[in-house]
Each structure stands twice: as structure tokens, then as C-alpha cells.
Amino acid sequence: VTVAKYLSTDGRPLSDPALSANGVEVTVLGPKGIAAERKAAGEKARKEAREAGRDPADVEELGASAEKSHLSNYDPKYHTVLRVKDPNDRIGSYAHVSPQGKEDPASSSLFSGYIFMTHDPEVGPDWGLRIQLKTPKSMLVRSFALKDVPLP
């Protein structure tokens, strides 16, 4: 699946029939999306503090701390952050696609429930995102047996 100019979808799920058919939901989190996620983390911390009976000053301090620390290692110059729902484990890899169509594989890591894709600073708003899906059509399964292999 390739989504052109995916950074413009900040805070909204990517729309693609192949993603939907495989039960995958990918939301790109740019500056607006990150701000919304931080605000939600702060509200969650405040709610939990109120339910625990903390005094109002502690409630606000815990909420502000959660907002500040949530996704604090995000740097838009080097990272693209994705919130991914992939219950069937269909996603195989991610890549950035230049405006000329050249694929640039992205190293990605899972951190606090978010996918952080590292990229060069040249990746900009006119770049695309390619998601390689693992489907029955794209996977080749071959059974094999090892013979005369000494076991340790």
C-alpha cells in the first residue's frame, strides 16, 4: 500500500481499501496529532489522580507532567510517528517514497504503543508512505525437513 503525501493526514487514519480489508488502521501523528495525544495522556493522568483522591495541585502537576513526557523523544525532523492497530499482524515493513517514486526503507521501532519511523531530514510533505502487508497472496510458505543434522 502506498499513500502519497501521507504527512497531510496528521491525526487522521490513512484511508486505503487494502488496509481496511486486512483490519489495519494506521494514523499518522504529526505536530497536531502529537499535541492531541499529549493532551489525552494528561487528561488520563488527571482523571486517575482525581479517582485516587489526590489534592487538586497534585492532580494538575501529574497531568502536566504526563503531557510533557508523553512522546517526548519525538523530533519531527527525524521521526514519523504512527499509531497502528494491526490485530492480525499483517504489517511487514514501512518505507518512505520520494516524489520521484524511489523507495527509502525506514527503520521502525515500537515505543510506548507507537511506531517511530526514523528518516532523513529530507523527507517532507510531498513524500509518500509505503506499507508492505503480509497477506496470503504475498507470503510464500515452504515446508522443509533437515536430515543428517547433528543436534547439540
Image (cartoon, rainbow, N blue to C red):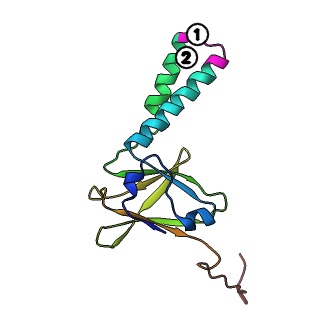
Is residue 118 shown above or below 45?
A: below
Q: Of residues 114 and 145, which is closer to you in this image?
A: 114
Element under disc 2: helix
Judge from the rendering whether residue 147 lies leftward or rightward of residue 64; answer left or right: right
The crowding category of the residue bearing disc 2, from other C-alpha atoms within 10 Å (few below 14, some 14 to 19, many at least 20), is many
The quarter of the picture where the C terminus appears is bottom right
Quick check: is 80 in the magenta stretch?
A: no
Residue 134 in which image quadrant: bottom right
Q: CA distance from mark 1 to mark 2?
A: 6 Å
Residue at the spot 65% in from the left edge and 77% down from the top edge? 136
List x then y, in percent, for residue 1.
49, 69
List x then y, in percent, for residue 111.
51, 47
Judge from the rendering whether residue 123 lies leftward or rightward of residue 150; answer left or right: left
Whether residue 70 appears in this view of the structure is no
The crowding category of the residue bearing disc 1, from other C-alpha atoms within 10 Å (few below 14, some 14 to 19, many at least 20), is few
Is residue 106 shown above or below 38?
A: below
Judge from the rendering whether residue 134 lies leftward or rightward of residue 10; answer left or right: right
Q: Are marks 1 and 2 in contact (CB under 8 Å)?
A: yes
Residue 3 in which image quadrant: bottom left
Q: Give the number of callouts.
A: 2
Residue at the spot 50% in from the left edge and 17% down from the top edge? 60
Which numbered circle lies on residue 55? 1
List x then y, in percent, for residue 61.
49, 18
The segment highlighted magenta reads: 50-56
Q: Of residues 20 and 142, which is closer to you in this image?
A: 20
Residue 34 in which image quadrant: top left
Whether residue 79 appears in this view of the structure is yes
- Amino acid identity at mark 2: Val
Find disc 2 in the rendering and name its residue.
59
